[in-house]
Amino acid sequence: MTKFMKVSLLAAASSLALATVAQAQDSIRFWTTEDQPERLARQEAMAADFTAETGVEVEVIPVSETDLGTRATAAFAAGDLPDVIYHTLQYALPWVEAGILDPDAASDVIEDLGEDTFAPGALSMAATPDGFASVPVDGWTQMIVYRADLFEENGLEAPTTYANVLAAIEALHNPPDMFGFVAATKVDENFMSQVLEHVFLANGVSPVGDDGFQELDEAATTEVLEFYRAIVEASPDGELFWQQSRELYFAGRAAMIIWSPFILDELAGLRDSAPPTITDDPTSAELASRTGIVTNFAGPSNPDGAAWADIRYFGITADADTDAAMDFVAYSMNEGYTATLSIAPEGKFPVRRGNEESPSAFTDAWAALDVGIDRRAPLGDLYPQEMIDEIVGGLDVAQRWGVSEGQLALASRIVNSQVINRLVREYIDGVRDASATVALMNEELARIE
């Protein structure tokens, strides 16, 4: 081989290597747990818009939510993490501690977009000592859904507190025609776990502290137990979960239920598989017009109350092409944010309200997005502005057990154990009194590591 040929081959190899590097820098991988075909198509369309804007290709990769943790751990070990991961709250801080996420990149994106444009609760859940683990994208708050028309007719205050709920039960409970509440009582359903955490949080009661498990305060926990027994006594008999609560409310036979916002389109008659039956027209929005919601709920020991929330985040990984990943996340939260929310508006409340030009730009755009399955309409056409404000405002004060203490993993294990569900149900069934129930909760929860 001549010297000239060797130089030519080396030059060609160098050019190929540079082209490969350039190609790598012009593309990123994005893992998303929104893996339903319609939702995936919307994300691919948004990614295509980003590519047209920046020239950076985005490979949108669906990952089952149940597989996300193990896949991320395996990819980290193999040095093959994607650039951006759409993930649930439970992974934010643990993934920073494990080295999977780059909190500096996330914090820079939030700072550039404007920290004050995000819902404080959504940010606080992912806060690190020096910034934020991930960029909050969307979320939803659990709601007390109630018959606002009946509350108004009877001069009742909205069910924002334990006391107001009990007063409404006293006035409206008239079984079998009208149940004051439909509370969750099926111990092995995650629905009961979510409802109970909401009710405990409302009264400022948590089983975790800064150092791990903390004993439940007997007085405040007794208030929780007595309140929950009261709403169960105002409910039908049986093993109750989300299905019965929705069916009874839709039939006009429940004054109050606790549910997620995914009920909002169904309330308005937009989904044939879950129609309101309060009128003869299953497509009617009549029930929606009679409904109010409460997101921030307070007990006697916690007058500020709390909103139980599920928040989702964009995590920029430690293996990312950082600049391209940051650009993609920033685009998804700014120019592309309305498209991001449009994936499922009824369950994707905007955690970013607006921008410097318009503080409510994204909230306004979200309220104009269509929701529904068999028929579609904007939330802003179905519900009044004060209800839209309540829906979005819950994210300002959003909470979950263990988040502020850095003990979310332990709190999740406590919830998943269903110990609290079981012992609350046994208290309601008269197996033991409140004092003994609190003592047994503390004894059993202390064993969970």
Image (cartoon, helix red, strand yellow):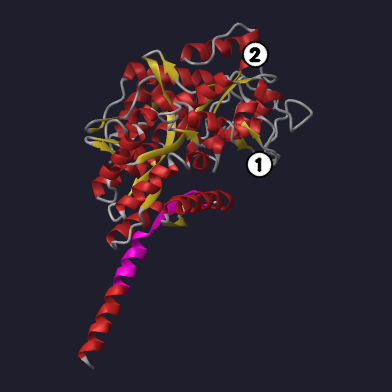
Name the element at disc 2. Answer: helix
Dividing the picture into quadrants, the one containing residue 226 is top left
Query: What type is the residue that disc 2 sits on?
Result: Leu
Tell which tag, 1 or 2, sits nearer the viewer: 1
Q: Quadrant of the C terminus?
A: top left
- Residue farthest along the bottom direction in this orientation: 1
Residue 45 or 99: which is nearer the viewer? Answer: 45
Q: Which residue is mark 2?
A: 150
Q: Is residue 279 visible?
A: yes
Relative horizontal placement of residue 17, taking residue 267 as reference (left or right): left
Could you tell me if residue 432 is visible in this image? no
Magenta region, residue range: 16-35
- Name above or below for residue 177 compared with residue 187: above
Residue shown at the point (67%, 30%) measured from the top left: 268
- Is residue 30 part of the magenta span, yes or no? yes
Q: Quadrant of the N terminus?
A: bottom left
Mark 2 crowd level (few <14, some 14–19, many ≥20, 10 Å Cα): some
Residue 415 percent across, percent down from the top left: 39, 37
The residue under the point 43% across, 33% down is 351
x and y, in percent, of residue 380 in the image: 60, 27
> For the residue labelled by badge 1, is the local secondary structure a helix, a strand or a loop?
loop
Residue marked by disc 1 = 373
Residue 248, horizontal then vertical, whole percent: 65, 28
Q: Earlier in the sequence, mark 1 or mark 2?
A: 2
Based on the displayed image, in which of its 4 quarters is residue 423 positioned? top left
User: As drawn, which residue projects farthest toward the front?
Assistant: 4
Above or below — where is 169 with respect to 124?
above
What kind of residue is marked 1?
Ile
Looking at the picture, tell me which residue is in the foreground, 381 or 141.
381
Relative placement, left or right, of 285 versus 414 is right
For image coordinates 27% across by 31% down, the residue present is 405
